[in-house]
Amino acid sequence: MKPGNMLAAIRLRGSASTRRGIEDTLKILGMGKMNSTVVVEDTPTIRGMMLKAGDYLTWGEATEETKKIVDGLRRGLKPAKGGIKGIRGRYPKGEMGYRGEKINELIKRMV
């Protein structure tokens, strides 16, 4: 995969009162628990899944360095150093949804 063809996603909310369809989408993406992170190929199907589950995760374009960081982890990431703004709003006011290449900075804060 080329660096421009990868997406990174981090699940920031738990499963309490999550609709079944969204929970299934998150599990298909490999994000069963909070703070779990994946780097996947950028396809229209994956982008559609990210948009569907956008109220539970944040995502954006991953660099090769970020892919190596995530691949090297055995477990999910810890919470971000310095905290997050809040899970209720969309980025840039909150933390949820699409954030472009800023996802790489968040992942580095979580390692």
Image: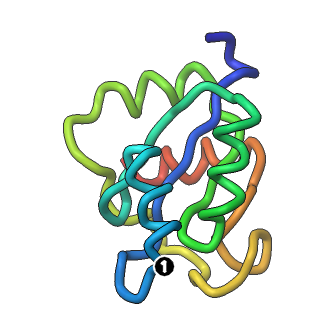
**Residue depicted at 50% across the width and 47% down the height:** 107
Residue extending furthest left? Answer: 74
Residue extending furthest front? Answer: 21
Assess disc 1: are there few (<14), some (14-19) or many (≥20) residues with their C-alpha within 10 Å of its C-alpha.
Answer: few
Question: Which of 53 and 61 lies nearest the eye of the viewer?
Answer: 53
Residue 1 location (% of width, % of height): 61, 11
Residue 59 location (% of width, % of height): 64, 51
In the rendered image, which residue does mark 1 sit on? 19
Residue 97 location (% of width, % of height): 70, 64
**Residue depicted at 63% across the width and 51% down the height:** 49
* On screen, residue 40 above or below 52: above
Q: Quadrant of residue 62?
A: top right
* On screen, residue 56 above or below 17: above
**Residue depicted at 64% across the width and 48% down the height:** 103
Question: Which of 89 and 18 lies nearest the eye of the viewer?
Answer: 18
Residue 29 location (% of width, % of height): 46, 45
Q: Callout 1, which amino acid?
A: Arg
Label 1: element kind: loop
